[in-house]
Amino acid sequence: MQTHDVIEVMEYEAIFCSGFGRNIDKKTFKELEHVMLELSQEGRDGLDFLSLSSRKGIGKVIRAKNYVGVLQMPSGRQLQILPKIHTSNVDARIVMLKMLKTFREFPSKSFDATELGNSKMPMFDIYISLFLREVSHIVKRGLKSDYRKKEENVRFYKGKMNFARQLTINHVHKERFFVAFDDYSIDCPENRILKKALMKAMMVASDPRNRREARRLLQYFDHVEESHTIDQEFKNILENRKNRQYTTSLEWSRLLLNDLNISNMVGNTRAQSLLFSMNQLFESYVGNLIERHSGTRWEVSLKNPVKSLFDRGSFRLVPDVVMNYICPIDNVKKTRIIDMKWKVLNPNIKNLGISQADMYQMFAYGKKYASEQVIVVYPLVESFAVNQRVFRYTSEDITVFIYLLDCVNGEKELLRFLDNPEDHQCKSDRLGDPIIRG
């Protein structure tokens, strides 16, 4: 019988068999190590979100990287990785779910991130509960019915006679008819896929509420055959207005039946994962926030327009956000570049730990896009004081603002800052050792 122990760690946190830090039992450590090595041997990306090393006096160490989500091992034990932010684990779950709502590859877009984040469900079961909610909505509206071609040997004539089969099968039984006909029923590809995914959910869910709900929903699929050719079922779906309500539930079904594999890492290990790059999640979250509140004040383009550092298209420049706005001082239309970096900064080290390459990149954005203001958004972490949110670096006619976003409660403050960065009190580049000086 599978166990469903949850090991919860933060990004970059180390996992040990013994010693300081996050300790797990030797058997689980070995299983996790085995999953990583198998994925690596298969040429998959298991080592993209976990690293394996050795430390003197301690032994082997597994460390989470900047991927978040859940990995369920063959035994059923789950490794849950949360984003590293400045507050509690509960808030970290809420932040991750808020970001997932904006992520294109995540199926569900309408759910209460705070409610789910505060629940005691493991992340794996939260994903399953979102799938079950979608199926429940479909059941309430009514399962789709469609015509399906069938061939049967019946006592009453209907449809069209299959003469070849009639002569072969019924040359003795003249009272029977081997016919082909269209049967209008709920036994269609969409419902066969949902039934298979519900059966999978009932089997892998650790939360009893999810198992009960999956069992309840399966009752509505009694007249739907169980499919053993799921890939073909997906190919047989024709998108139209009749199955539009199935879109999200089918995306979840594809993930469930593919072992919750959005990171393409599952091979022969029988592990299941739903892991996301925090770089991509952060870009999606902040970009979506700015775009939603652009209104009449800003014209916002995400990942567009693309320019080149040199002529003939050499070295492409693709900022996360290009914002055109009317300057309140001279009423002239100007351009502001905004870029997102999910990196942990530190006020106690030189230049906050901002990489030289990142600042060169921002300076190039400013020059090529004729932007006087370039804003780089980083996540706020616990080592910064309350008044340390904005830092400024100036060179020639370009100012690069470093903005630390409170991912829990800082959305409104970011939007106020974007209205007019010059109005905000900044830590001058004279306070640090700036990368670029004017």
Image (tube, grey):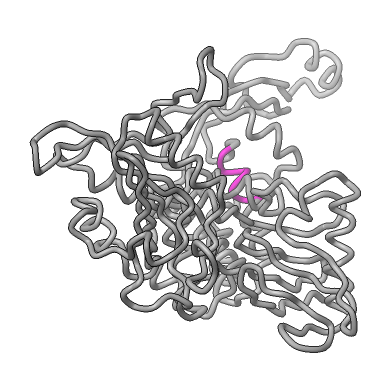
Pick the quarter of the image with the N terminus.
Answer: bottom right
Report the number of discs: 0
The residue positioned 43% from the left and 68% from the top of the image is: 380
Camera-nearest residue between 211 and 395: 395
Q: Which portion, as a residue range, is magenta?
A: 190-196
**Predominant SS along the magenta part:** helix
Q: Position of residue 312 (x, y in %)?
A: 53, 12
Camera-nearest residue between 179 and 338: 338
Q: Position of residue 117 (x, y in %)?
A: 46, 73
Left or right of 430, for residue 72: right
Q: Where 204 sits versus 107, above or below? A: below
Q: Where 101 sits versus 188, above or below? A: below
Camera-nearest residue between 155 and 80: 80
Left or right of 411, for residue 243: right
Left or right of 410, for residue 31: right
Camera-nearest residue between 342 and 147: 342
The residue positioned 42% from the left and 42% from the top of the image is: 245
Q: Position of residue 353 (x, y in %)?
A: 55, 62
Residue at the bottom extreme, as displayed: 19
Magenta includes 194?
Answer: yes
Res. 73 image quadrant: bottom right
Magenta includes 38?
Answer: no
The residue positioned 84% from the left and 75% from the top of the image is: 29
Res. 218 image quadrant: bottom right
Q: Where 292 sits versus 119, above or below? A: above
